[in-house]
Structure formats: structure tokens, C-alpha cells
Image (cartoon, rainbow, N blue to C red):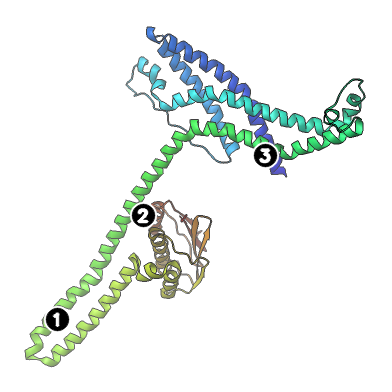
Amino acid sequence: MRSLLKHLGTDTRYTLLGLPLAILSFSLLTAGLSAGLGTLVVWVGLPVLAVTMLVARGFADVERRWLPEILGRPVARPRYKKPPETAGWARRLVQPLANGQSWLDLLHGIVVFPVAIVTFVVTVVWWAVTVTGLLYPLYGWITSNIPGNTQLPELLGFGRGYVIDSAFYLVMGAVFAITLPGIVRGAALLQAGLGRALLTGVAELHERIDDLTEGRAAAVSAEASALRRLERDIHDGPQQRLVYLAMELSRAQRQLQKDPQAAHATLSEAITATRETLDELRALSRGIAPPILSDRGLAPALAALAGRCTIPVELDVQTVERYTAVVENSVYYVAAETLTNIAKHSRAELCTLSLSRTGDTLLLAIGDDGVGGAHVAKGHGLAGLADRLRAVDGELIVQSPVGGPTLIIAEVPCG
């Protein structure tokens, strides 16, 4: 109830104050635009238009400060292009004319006027009918007894009298009171929607482009790190074993005619080395994209990960849906890397892994009772996981105070 009244007060204040501001902006901006365009041929119009643009920006800034409270979320701040440091006074004077957002600010300052009139009238009418209707019993005995004063209930055929008038206006006031929050909210959103479209729409696109650029850079960085690690693992593991295997087979070839028994022993060692190499290659391939993940999905793949972990893992998978390959690979990679880090560094005795879906977001939560101290600072293992998630518009949240426990949450959009 308190939240509803708070929103009602905020929306009412916004629509009531919006009209005086719209009248002022419409008057100043239309006058400045007309004067600037009219005197443009004699160059006087350029500074007039520039000043008009700056005034429009001021009104737009006031509106942008109101929008978060109405929309319930932050809004993007436009980027106004600044003149070069070496620019002269003439260039600096006309710089506002070169900003596309300045023209949108000007457009908003003009077209908001009729919208503000509508929202103001709707808000005032609904509040007026609500208040006068609910308070009618307090003053209605005066108006009902005025000779020749015809009330609305009488015109509608309900009869005449204080009781009838009071009942009618109370019902009407109650109806308007019930619908008041929704109507005023709709009026406020109509006016705020216009402001969002003209004053923050381009800025939101710029922020989205920046996010995509950052995500692409993060994806490239994460992929490069993964390839370097894979190259290092192959060089330090299977490649060395294959070199050793080649040397053993060459030795067995030389021993085959001179000492068959020694050659047999050498071949046995080579077979053992071959099996170990295959096991290591399988372990490396599991870190990339194991067959169980592509064939059966995340739930079985995470169960297999938990079964191979050297620390006991309590598994809680609440979703068995199939997702896109990039989502499943990202979640699996984060789980595999996190469990590996826990086994190597945490000194934990128990680990928990849960997977759930909330709306269009897939949540992977991994916790342990180890020593803590994990963070996503650059140069640490978790930084690569954060980059990988950022590439798919995901987020990595790490809660790991020194001394533990540690909780790592990966949020991945899956809608």
C-alpha cells in the first residue's frame, strides 16, 4: 500500500510539474528556433540557434533527471560531441548544431507540450473527481438544498435529495479512486516514454554497441587464452608422451632382431604410454566440448564433472532443458574450470553445484568450504571465466572472503 501511494505521488508530481516546464520550453524553443531560422541568411541566426540548442539541452537534462524515478531504472546519458581543443570561438559557438542529440532535445522540448497538456488534464480530472466525490457528504447538504440547483443524479433520473446525491457521488468518487493509480501511472508513462525515446534512445544504442564491442573483445581474449592453455597442455602432456612413444618404438625396432625379449618389454611400455596419452587427450577434449554435453545436455555433463572431481560434490540440477550450444558450452566451461580451481587451490572438503533457470536466465552456483580469497582481478584464473561469460552477455559473481566460504555464481541469458 505504501509503495502504491509513493508511486501515485511520484507520478502525480511528474505530470503536474511537467506542464509548466513544457509551456516554458515550448515558448522559449519555438521563439529561438523561429528567430534563428529567420535570421540565418545574415549569419545572426547561427549563434541564436546555438543558444537555443543549449537551452533545449538544459530542459532535456531536467527531464532525464526525472525519468529514472518514473521508469524505475537508470537511463543512459547522451554523449554530446565536444569541439576540438584547437577550435576557434566560431567553431565552439556553432558546435551544438553539429550534435544530432541536440536536435532531438529541441524536438522533445516542442512536441512534449501537447502531450503534457493531455497528461496534466487527465491527472487533474481524476484527482478532482476522486476528492470531490469522496468528500461530497461533508459539503453536499449545502449544494443539495440550493433552490433550482439541479444535480447530476437528478439529470440521470435517480431522483433528488441529499442522500441520493451523496450515494451517487460517493460511488463515482470510489470508482475514480480505484482507477486513479492506474490512470495517473499511464499518463506518466506516456509522457516519460516520449522523453525516453527522444532523450535517451540514441544513448542506449551507443551503450549497447559498447557492450557488444566489449563482449566481442572479451570473447576474443577468452578464446585466445583458452587456445594458449590448450597449446601448453598439449605441449607439456600428449606431445611429450608421443615423442617418448616414438623413441620407444624406434628402440623396439632395433631390438627386434637382436633381443626379441627386450623388444617385447619395450613394446609393452609403449602400449602403456599410448593408453596414458589417450586418457590425457580425452581429459583435454572434455575441457573443450565433451560428447556427453552435445549428446545429452548440461545435466548429465555436470553430473559427469561432479563425479570426476577429487572433492565430494553435492549436485542439484533443477533444469533438464536443452539450450543453445553456446550457452551449454559456456556453462560447462565455467563449471569445469571452477571445479578444477577448487580441487587445486581451495583446500575444501565439500563442494556444492546447482543449476537452475529463473525467467530467461540460467544460474550456475558453485560453492565450497575452503580457504576463500578468490576474485576476478586481471591475471587470476577467474578473470578468463568472466571474459567468457561477458562474451555471451553473462556475468560472473564471486563472493569469497579470506577464510571462506566461497560462492561463485554464473548468470547466462538463455531466452
SS at mark 1 in the image: helix
- Residue at point 59% right, 27% down? 115
Q: Left or right: where does residue 16 sit relative to residue 71?
A: right
Q: Quadrant of residue 146?
A: top right
User: Which residue is disc 2 drawn over?
Assistant: 379
Residue 259: where, in percent of width, then height?
A: 10, 91
User: Which residue is disc 1 drawn over?
Assistant: 249
| Depth check, front residue: 211 or 258 | 211
Direction bottom: furthest residue: 261
* Residue 333 visible, this orientation: yes
SS at mark 3 in the image: helix
User: Which residue is disc 3 drawn over?
Assistant: 182
Assess whether mark 1 and mark 3 are in contact (beta carbons under 8 angstroms).
no
Give the tally of numbered discs.
3
Residue 265's label in the rendered image is none
SS at mark 2 in the image: loop
